[in-house]
Image (cartoon, grey):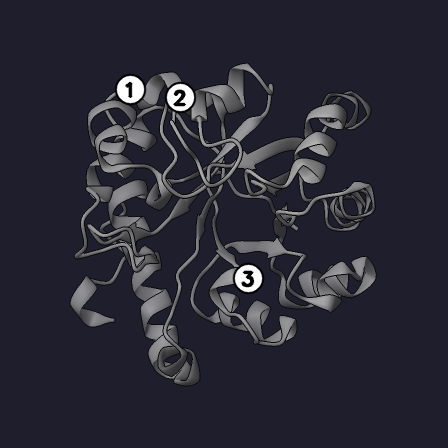
Amino acid sequence: MQIKQNPLILSTDTLPNYWLDLIFSIAKSTWFDGIDLAMRKWFDARDEEYVQKLSLDHKMPVYIIQTSTKLNQKELDKALDLCQSTNADTICINSPKITDFKAYDFITDNLKNYKEDNKDINFSIINPKDSKLFALPIPEYRFSNIIDIVKKYDAYVWLDVSNIDMDSFENEFTRKIDDYAPYISVVYLSDKTKDWKSHLVPWDWTLDLKTFLKRLRKSWYSRPISVKIDFKPTELANKEKLRRQLKKARVYYDKYFLEISDNSQDDEDI
């Protein structure tokens, strides 16, 4: 199965309560290049043979294995099994709550050894909501300081742009993307409102994602971009409308990241 540079992949978090087989099918029919698998939310997502079969049947590579906020040894070992069966090269760790000492201690005590034993895997930490580049006074989640994820914990950043505070995103991060790009393993492409309702469709909201994507491309970023959108229940119930929205996300990515114009449909056509 061919592995693409800068694949646009669909997060299974986008389609909660859908069967995993249907998620692969929808991703294929809406022009995505692969899957970002959140193993914590689907029982069958932990069955490496089944996931491998879905990937082969749909010709949809699994690029990412995503773990929960309550990470432990059993879950991380299962994530490694899934990487081996699917050829995924990245494990993304959701930041535990600030009060979850057990998960935090497991990550900080064991991440170094896991990295040494699995040098072909990119271990990454997702920056949580309200995260900043530098200090954060009273965070709700661990790893809210993006610089610390890289320098203190020696991990890659899974960059969720809708979780970064506005000033950091526009005045620091986008402007200095060349410095940060080598430490990013995956980018979540979604928007947010001014009052922090996050993971919205990547157009017509508050973040200047067009400029961000163009600068990210020029920084020689070569890793996946994952689409995670929190659709309303009514939108999830309407599969045709859902497919149109996902296709529009694909067109948006092509236009502002890949800068493809010859073969891409115009936004209004979707």
Count up the numbered dots.
3
Q: Amino acid at mark 3?
A: Thr
Task: Work out whether 179 lies above or below 242.
Answer: above
- Pick the front one: 159 or 36: 159
Mark 3 and mark 1 lie on one chain; the one further toward the N terminus is 3
Q: Name the image quarter holding residue 269.
A: bottom left
SS type, badge 2? helix
Q: Is residue 263 left or right of residue 49?
A: left
The image shows residue 102 at horizontal and vertical percentages of 72, 38
Q: Is residue 123 left or right of residue 133?
A: right
Task: Work out whether 58 lies above or below 198.
Answer: below
- Which residue does the numbered mark 1 point to in the structure image? 176
- Which residue does the numbered mark 3 point to in the structure image? 12
Q: Residue at position x 43%, y 68% from top?
A: 30
- Pick the front one: 250 or 3: 250
Q: Residue at position x 68%, y 26% from top?
A: 108
The image shows residue 160 at horizontal and vertical percentages of 41, 42
Q: Residue at position x 20%, y 63% from top?
A: 267
Q: Residues within 10 Å of mark 3 (few under 14, many from 20)?
A: many
Q: CA distance from mark 3 to mark 2?
A: 26 Å
Q: Amino acid at mark 2?
A: Tyr
The image shows residue 10 at horizontal and vertical percentages of 49, 57
Q: CA distance from mark 3 to mark 1?
A: 30 Å
Q: Are marks 2 and 1 in contact (CB under 8 Å)?
A: yes
Q: CA distance from mark 2 to mark 1?
A: 7 Å
- Which residue does the numbered mark 2 point to in the structure image? 180
Q: Residue at position x 63%, y 41% from top?
A: 100
Task: Work out whether 48 lies above or below 187.
Answer: below
Q: Amino acid at mark 1?
A: Lys
SS type, badge 1? loop
Task: Work out whether 162 lies above or below 205.
Answer: above
SS type, badge 3? helix
